Image (tube, helix red, strand yellow):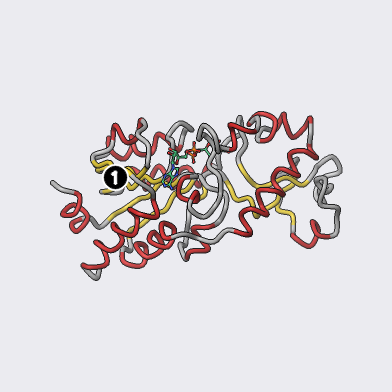
Amino acid sequence: MDLHRYLLETTRIAVLTGAGVSAESGIPTFREAQTGLWSQYDPMTLASPEGFAQQPDLVWRWYQWRRELVAKAAPNAGHKALASIQQHLPEFTLITQNVDGLHQQAGSSDVLELHGNIHRTVCSRTGSAIEASWLSAHAAAEPPPSPHHADGLARPDVVWFGEALDECTLQQSFDAAQDCELMIVAGTAGVVHPAASLPVMAQQAGARVVDINPEHNEISRMANWYLQGTSARWLPVLAATLEKENR
Ligand code: OAD
């Protein structure tokens, strides 16, 4: 069956997005050879609990820089297309590895953020939320002390290497993967687990998988359809197909 016909027959869609979906909003991805964040910075220094324990100021400033990048960015046509698909399809789940909040800014709701959100801040000891007003009352060049624990520091509410994902978000993502008829994967290299297992899980449970990415990778090889190119190009095409049916 071709993708066009399958889309028209599908009622349950799950989507998995990665950094590539925000690339056209001006936010660098992680693993691209020249421009990727991990080609310029050591992930274990900047995105691990050990790195934060050793150099909290450096890690805090790096996240401040990323927060500023994100603040200047706007959702692109790919983000907007996913928000629009959700309006047409009641059984729709958006799972993202991105921490930038651009899906929600585009109008998506109930987004499953597997790796957290850069706009939220928590106590490094208790995980309790820290308010923006507390942060703005402290210097920006170092992580403020936590209001919740004497030995705690403020840290971004994101998942670092070696840390567990939120159990509830992960379970909801597994459920969506096992329950959908179509999984759309966009803008992920598919190397970080458990996110990268979701398309495999969906396919094993009987769903078909479509992958959108300018580059071939493991996911494009296992997918039922591979749309080579950017998410801002292809996601609006999928949205238009679903909208034509006026569901
Ligand atoms: P990567 O940087 O590993 O991969 C980005 C993917 O997006 C690559 O496959 C690119 O080919 C593709 N890409 C680039 N531009 C694109 C575009 N305009 N449209 C569509 N695709 C495009 O990012 P992720 O797979 O998201 O985790 O990385 C997964 C996780 O690894 C991240 O959430 C982060 C990172 O370490 C943590 O920090 C825990």
Residue 193 horizontal side relative to residue 7, left or right: right
State which quarter of the image contains the C terminus.
Answer: bottom left
Total marks in image: 1
Q: Residue furthest bottom?
A: 246
Residue 96 x/y as whole percent: 47, 48
Residue 32 in the image: above or below residue 113: above
Quadrant hosting residue 136: bottom right
**Residue identifier under label 1:** 227
What residue lies at 46% left-to-right and 34% top-to-bottom?
A: 194
What amino acid is at disc 1? Leu
Mark 1, ligand 1, within 8 Å: the answer is no
Q: Nearer the viewer, residue 45 or 89?
A: 45
Residue 147 in the image: above or below residue 243: above
Disc 1 residue crowd, few under 14, some 14–19, many 20+, Cα 10 Å: some
Q: Nearer the viewer, residue 137 or 110?
A: 137
Residue 133 horizontal side relative to residue 23, left or right: right
Residue 23 x/y as whole percent: 50, 49
What residue lies at 75% left-to-right and 44% top-to-bottom?
A: 61
Callout 1: helix, strand or loop? strand
Residue 155 x/y as whole percent: 73, 45
Residue 239 x/y as whole percent: 31, 61
Q: Residue furthest left?
A: 1
Residue 246 in the image: above or below residue 164: below
Q: Nearer the viewer, residue 174 or 200?
A: 200
Residue 51 in the image: above or below residue 147: above
What residue lies at 32% left-to-right and 46% top-to-bottom?
A: 183
Q: Nearer the viewer, residue 39 or 196?
A: 39
What residue lies at 40% left-to-right and 42% top-to-bottom?
A: 174
